[in-house]
Amino acid sequence: MKIDSTFALRNGVQIPLFGLGTWRAESGQARQAVSFALQNGYRLIDTAAYYQNEEEVGAGLRDSGIPREHVFVTSKVWIDDAGYDETLAAFEGSLTRLGLDYLDMYMVHWPVKDKYKDTYRALERLYREKRIRVIGVSNFPVRLLREMDAETETGPMVDQLQFHPLYFRGEEYEYGKGQGILIQAWKPLARGRLSEDARLLEMADKHGKTPEQVLLRWLLQLGVGVIPKSVQKQRILQNADVFDFQLEQEEMSYLCGLDKGESLSGLPDGVVQS
């Protein structure tokens, strides 16, 4: 496994397992972070309309000098734009801000009650029209994954979830493995809640890594995609320095066993509960 290793989605598209998240990348930071990350081997960039940095992400992509076809770009439709026509309009806005003529993946950011099916139908249209290569969902519990698979022409290919040792999304993970859906982790470092865990510190010392690098490696060995966010050059490089060691099965099992079903984020109003 290396920084540009990919996962074959159920439609055959290859998606990088490792990428850069841009949530809360402030004005002036996202552009530099995206360009630097791409110049140092990253090949997936994750943004969203809600992040309000799509213009900077697009500029960073152009600044990097990396050909567009070599970068997997994701954006998401926010809950305020849920619905069929609203999603199509939101997609056009994202493309314009990014300065692109297609997206590799467009995602339903949250499943809004009574609207997520219409939102998803809009993504199916964009997929049929070849304006997106991958249909993704975010924060969809397993029952909605099953529902989308049963009721749509093209089922979800990626589910982006809060996923870390304290919140191991076992049902979604197992369903994804069985159906060829990539689980992609947000908040993969659990907001530093495990940075003082004695066993994790022991693992980090043993492998000559930081606790954060161990957590990223744990996810990658599970086959979960990761999109750690940083705007600091040193941290961007550090996050990517996780491909020269291997966690043992006992270490993997320990981290899996820390699950408390503990979400570290609240839910927006009006979305389907997990």
Image (tube, grey):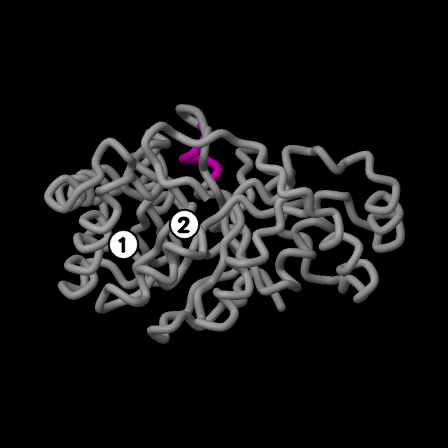
Location of residue 150 by image quarter: bottom left
Identify which residue, 109 or 53, lies in the foreground.
Answer: 109
Dominant SS in magenta: helix
Location of residue 135 by image quarter: bottom left
Residue at 69 percent across and 56 percent down: it is 218
Left or right: residue 99 compared with residue 56? left
Q: Amino acid at mark 1?
A: Leu
Give yes or no for residue 31 being in the magenta stretch: yes
> In the rendered image, which residue does mark 1 sit on?
103
Q: Residues within 10 Å of mark 2 (few under 14, many from 20)?
A: many
Task: Say which element carries label 1.
Answer: strand
Tell me the number on the disc at residue 170. Answer: none
Task: Say which element carries label 2.
Answer: loop
Identify which residue, 238 or 264, lies in the foreground.
Answer: 264
Residue 89: image x %, image y %? 13, 41
Residue sitting farthest toward the bottom: 12
> In the rendered image, which residue does mark 2 sit on?
140
Identify which residue, 199 or 166, lies in the foreground.
Answer: 166
Residue 4: image x %, image y %? 52, 63
Give yes or no for residue 98 being in the magenta stretch: no
Span shown in magenta: 29-33
Q: Amino acid at mark 2?
A: Phe
Identify which residue, 110 or 32, lies in the foreground.
Answer: 110
The image shows residue 205, relative to residue 143, as above or below, that is: above
Residue at 77 percent across and 60 percent down: it is 253
